[in-house]
Image: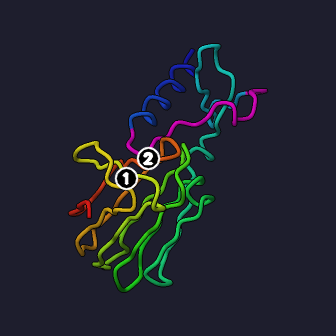
């Protein structure tokens, strides 16, 4: 009983955080055994059918980017849920791949790197703006003023919409 309560507390805590993303149950391995200290059991209508290990659930790729001003995020990076740290010494333009449900990316300026950040869709997808919940025009972008604290996180919910889930700094649709 204590294990079930603990699992429910962990799932509740993880579900309340801003970076939590729905995981497709069908893509998870079938439950054959349970390790209480490291397994989370998603509960679905028919009961617990699959498990996620805490180690895999909490893993997010991190890329320190300094190459040039054009960061083209790959579909693999977005599917992995990659967090990009910008150390480039100029305006950084991040272009997202074609949206696919469950993709997630974050971008942040590195330590003492006061740079303008811009986020562009692939030209056909939309960015759903955080202040209004409304889509911008396809091919428009979302940009931040130069500040070392700039950060943005986005999640794709379908094949056309990237939701801006959180921002730090001053951002505007352009």
Check the image and name the residue furthest to the right: 32
Q: Residue 6: image x %, image y %?
A: 51, 25
- Figure check: 150 above or below 99: below
Q: Pick the residue in front: 142 or 18.
A: 142
Q: Residues within 10 Å of mark 1 (few under 14, many from 20)?
A: many
Determine which residue is flagged by label 1: 127
In the image, the segment drawn in magenta is 17-33
Report the quarter where the C terminus lies. bottom left
* Mark 2, other Cα within 10 Å: few <14 / some 14–19 / many ≥20: many
**Left or right, 42 with reference to 141:** right
User: Residue drawn at (26%, 60%), measured in percent from left and top?
Assistant: 173
Tell me the distance, in whole angstroms, between the alpha carbons under discs 1 and 2.
6 Å
Q: Quadrant of the N terminus?
A: top right
- Total numbered labels: 2
Relative to 85, 59 lies left or right: right
Could you tell me which secondary element the residue under label 1 belongs to? Answer: strand
**Magenta-colored segment: predominant secondary structure:** loop
Residue visible at 45% across and 53% down in the picture: 125
- Tag 2 residue: 161
Along the line of sight, the residue nearer the viewer: 93 or 98 = 98
Badge 2 element: strand
Choose between 16 and 103: the one closer to the eye: 103
Whether the magenta-drawn stretch holds residue 22 is answered as: yes
Contact between labelled residues 2 and 1, with CB atoms less than 8 Å apart: no
Q: Position of residue 5 (x, y in %)?
A: 51, 20
Up-down relation of residue 22 to residue 74 (above or below): above
Circle on res. 17: none
Q: Which percent across, then down, holds residue 96?
A: 48, 62
Whichever of callouts 1 and 2 sits on the residue coming sooner in the sequence is: 1
Q: Position of residue 39 (x, y in %)?
A: 64, 34
Quarter holding residue 113: bottom left
Residue 172 is a magenta residue: no
């Amino acid at each position: 009983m204590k294990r079930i309560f603990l699992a429910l507390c962990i799932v509740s805590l993880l579900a309340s955080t801003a970076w939590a993303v729905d995981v497709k149950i069908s893509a998870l391995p079938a439950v054959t055994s349970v390790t209480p200290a490291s397994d989370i059991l998603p509960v679905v209508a028919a009961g617990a059918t699959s498990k996620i290990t805490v180690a895999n659930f909490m893993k997010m790729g991190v890329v320190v980017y300094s190459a040039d001003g054009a960061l083209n995020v790959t579909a693999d990076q977005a599917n992995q849920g990659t967090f990009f740290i910008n150390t480039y010494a100029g305006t950084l333009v991040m272009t997202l791949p074609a949206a696919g449900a469950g993709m997630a990316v974050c971008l942040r300026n590195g330590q003492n790197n006061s740079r303008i950040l811009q986020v562009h869709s692939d030209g056909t997808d939309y960015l759903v703006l955080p202040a209004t919940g409304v889509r911008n025009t396809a091919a428009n972008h979302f940009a931040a003023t130069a500040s070392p604290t700039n950060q943005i996180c986005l999640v794709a919910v379908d094949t056309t919409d990237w939701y801006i889930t959180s921002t730090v700094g001053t951002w505007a649709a352009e």
